[in-house]
Image: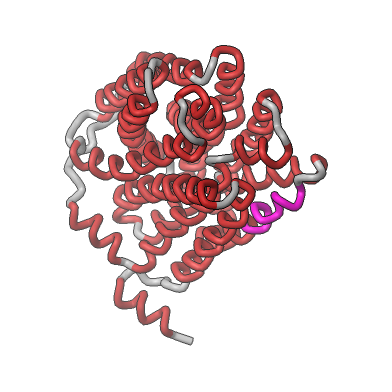
């Protein structure tokens, strides 16, 4: 497999840290800027919602640009967005900077995912996607805990400054390591996206991503306040828990791709949500014992990152001719899931208690499993044949 895939994973490490760091520093942003925990949590919501909406629009608008230069511009914009986030004088200004960072991040992730699948042979596509997502999950094991350490030492602004520095370095390294990146060529017609979304098999597969990731983020977006409320976690303990979560999560991206290749994309897309429900649901029942809580949290963390490469490989195998459309739409779906989960978690906290976030998350993931079962019954790609398949006993 082409080793340049690992450079692309390093890029997604930076983007993953930017998206995931907010959940760990929510209490500190809220305190410093004088807003509620729920309001601070919406910084994750707006980031993911912007990502979801920007990904297909920017991919279409920039289709004829050289990918190398486009990636450089996106990385530089990403750098500026985080630099100004670190300098934010108010919540409103920070909110705006998160939008800019998210839009550039969307283009970066779509570009590197597409490039990665083109770099490798067909039998390695699932693993290549898994490695890309290892970069994002890897940000949890190193990036987010390091960011929390900076937050403890220098305040919540320090992690954003650190991400800006990483983005600047990557902007310099990319043209040196990827000198022959091709242009995108012709734009994918908008009708292809419409066809994709009209197909029940593909649409419900996209809903698997939205709902499983959404269920995960109902709790994960507010993990810091949840641990503070339930077990009285201190700042240093939060860093430790995020490190353990990330250590497990970093294996999830690769394992998702590996399971998809080894077990088959149909088996994998049903198996993972089923197991995920068990461990997310078990979290509240393990809080009184670290011996139980830590392994349960780590299994939850690892499983949370398996679904993205599994769904993307499922979509590619189901409609190989339109793989670019599938990847673009799925990147949007994943971040709609993050936005949904963050928003729903904020509503739960505002009107009830952070203690209820795991239960609500489980309910959302059950819906994801139902969508997976629905989609896998549609063995044919056409809309009409899919509907016929679903009504058979």
Is residue 367 shown above or below 98? below
Residue 257 visible in the current orientation:
no
**Residue 346 x %, y %:** 49, 45
Q: Magenta residues: mostly which secondary structure?
A: helix
Image colouring:
secondary structure
Quarter occupied by residue 146: top right
**Residue 192 x %, y %:** 22, 56
Name the residue rendered at 55%, 44% in the picture.
305
Residue 312 visible in the current orientation:
yes
Is residue 203 shown above or below 65? below
Name the residue rendered at 61%, 52% in the picture.
356
Name the residue rendered at 73%, 38% in the picture.
231
**Residue 212 x %, y %:** 51, 54
Is residue 380 shown above or below 7? below
Residue 174 on the magenta segment: no
Name the residue rendered at 27%, 23% in the picture.
73
Q: Number of callouts in the render?
A: 0
- Residue 129 horizontal side relative to residue 366, left or right: left
Residue range highlighted in magenta: 277-286
Q: Residue furthest bottom?
A: 393
Q: Nearer the viewer, residue 342 or 115?
A: 342
**Residue 145 x %, y %:** 61, 25
């Amino acid at each position: 497999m082409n080793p340049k895939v690992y450079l692309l994973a390093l890029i997604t490490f930076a983007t993953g840290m930017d998206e995931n760091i907010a959940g760990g520093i929510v209490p500190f942003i809220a305190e410093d800027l004088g807003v509620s925990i729920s309001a601070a949590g919406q910084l994750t919501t707006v980031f993911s919602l912007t990502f979801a909406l920007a990904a297909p629009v920017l991919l279409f608008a920039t289709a004829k640009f050289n990918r190398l230069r486009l990636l450089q511009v996106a990385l530089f914009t990403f750098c500026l967005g985080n630099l100004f986030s670190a300098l934010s004088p108010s919540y409103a200004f920070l909110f705006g900077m998160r939008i800019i960072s998210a839009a550039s991040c969307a283009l970066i992730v779509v570009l590197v995912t597409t490039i990665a699948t083109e770099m490798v042979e067909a039998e390695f596509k699932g693993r290549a996607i898994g490695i890309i997502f290892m970069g994002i999950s890897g940000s949890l094991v190193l990036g987010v805990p390091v960011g929390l350490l900076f937050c403890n030492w220098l305040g919540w602004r320090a992690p954003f400054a650190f991400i800006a520095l990483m983005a600047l370095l990557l902007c310099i390294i990319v043209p040196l390591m990827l000198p022959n990146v091709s242009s995108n060529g012709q734009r994918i017609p908008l009708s292809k996206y419409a066809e994709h979304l009209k197909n029940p098999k593909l649409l419900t597969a996209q809903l698997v991503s939205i709902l499983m990731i959404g269920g995960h983020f109902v709790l994960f977006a507010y993990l810091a306040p949840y641990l503070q409320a339930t077990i009285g976690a201190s700042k240093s303990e939060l860093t430790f828990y995020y490190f353990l979560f990330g250590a497990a999560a970093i294996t999830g991206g690769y394992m998702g791709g590996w399971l998809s290749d080894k077990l088959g994309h149909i088996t994998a897309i049903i198996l993972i949500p089923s197991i995920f429900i068990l461990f997310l649901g078990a979290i509240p029942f393990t809080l009184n014992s670290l011996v139980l809580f830590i392994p349960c949290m780590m299994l939850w963390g690892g499983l949370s990152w398996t679904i993205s490469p599994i769904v993307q490989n499922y979509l590619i195998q189901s409609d190989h001719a339109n793989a670019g459309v599938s990847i673009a739409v799925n990147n949007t779906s994943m971040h709609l899931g993050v936005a949904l989960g963050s928003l729903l978690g904020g509503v739960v906290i505002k009107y009830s208690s952070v203690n209820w976030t795991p239960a609500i998350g489980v309910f959302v993931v059950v819906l994801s499993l139902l969508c997976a079962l629905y989609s896998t019954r549609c063995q044919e790609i056409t809309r009409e044949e899919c509907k016929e398949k679903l009504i058979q006993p």
